Amino acid sequence: MIDYYKTLEVSKTATQDEIKKAYRKLARKYHPDMNPNDKNAEQKFKEINEANEVLSNPENRAKYDKYGEHWQHGEEYERAQQQAQGGFGGFAQGDFQEGDYSDFFRNMFGGRTEGFGRGYGRAAGKFKGQDIYADMELSLREAAVTQQRTFSVNGQNIRITVPAGVYEGLQIKLKGHGHQGYNGGPNGDLYITFHITPDSQFERDGNDLKTIVNIDLYTAVLGGEVLIETLNGKVKMKVAAETQNGTTVRLKGKGMPIYKQEGAFGDLFVSYHVTLPQNLTDKQKALFEQLKNS
């Protein structure tokens, strides 16, 4: 049995935040892109993802803590135990003892029905496969455009279309792309959670973007024009005379595309940072003195 806590190098009392941090640290360390052609790192990466699939979900974690490797089928055990305690279908009351999980699951998944009683044994063992939870990292600029991504799950390459505007923490479900079902049961599902890496120029605030643009003192005082970089290229903006340091202007529709709302965009907020001239000549200093005293 794999100890998921040991895999993520956390204690059994770790908080969800500690589990998340541990997973992201190890995932980066063993990611196939960081370890090309390293089979050991690839296997370790798969184990890390498997552990995170369970421990990052509080409900699944609670089942794992109780049932161990058979956590996904704990509910079936409990139903069978309840039926046994009620003397249903040939179960003798008390047949199941707390902790008899291994024998129960071995019977279910080994295809043996002896001891299960009438009806229940014939239906046992047909269960949905385990769900898979995966993370996908995108840069802010990648998240701003619709694109296709290919990744590997259970040895199969899956190609998905990532809509423009995905945001931090967004989770999507791909039905039937999880682990294979048991004894003819349906496959599990694949859940992908998106993480958006910080951008050096733009700060995201919902669907809006924020940026800082430097303008010189002369433009701030006299007015002028400045080139503003957006996600779709540069645009020219007029700067009003006597613009104060920290003044913020809005460029409507130049923010992030809104997720699954075609043609809809947030806004870009530009804050001006006025830079002061340096290495002034004596003549320039004298002119500033005149302005000061005028």
Image (spheres, rainbow, N blue to C red):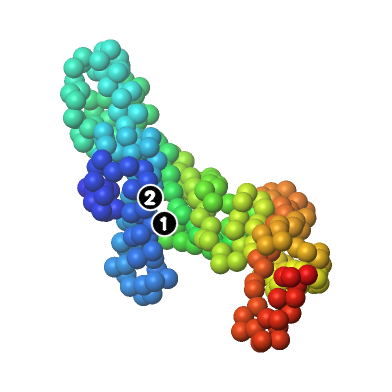
Q: Residue furthest front?
A: 293
Name which residue lies at 75% across and 75% down.
290
Name which residue lies at 71% across and 86% down.
283
Q: Nearer the viewer, residue 177 or 162?
A: 162
Name the residue that disc number 2 marks: 20
SS under mark 1: loop
SS under mark 2: helix
On screen, residue 109 versus residue 184, left or right, reads: left
- Which label's residue is closer to the chain start, 2 or 1? 2
Name which residue lies at 30% across and 25% down.
78
Percent x, y for residue 229? 70, 69
Tag 2–tag 1 contact (CB < 8 Å) = no
Percent x, y for residue 103? 20, 34
Q: Looking at the image, is mark 2 or mark 1 nearer the viewer?
A: 2
Q: Is residue 231 visible to the viewer in this orientation of the structure?
A: no
On screen, residue 254 versus residue 64, left or right, reads: right
Name which residue lies at 19% across and 20% down.
95
**Kind of residue at badge 1:** Asn
**Kind of residue at badge 2:** Lys
Rendering quarter of residue 91? top left
Up the image or down, 71 lies above or below 42; here it is above
Residue 154 circle label: 1
Q: Tell me the crowding category of disc 2: few under 14, some 14 to 19, or many 20 or more residues within 10 angstroms, Cα based.
A: some
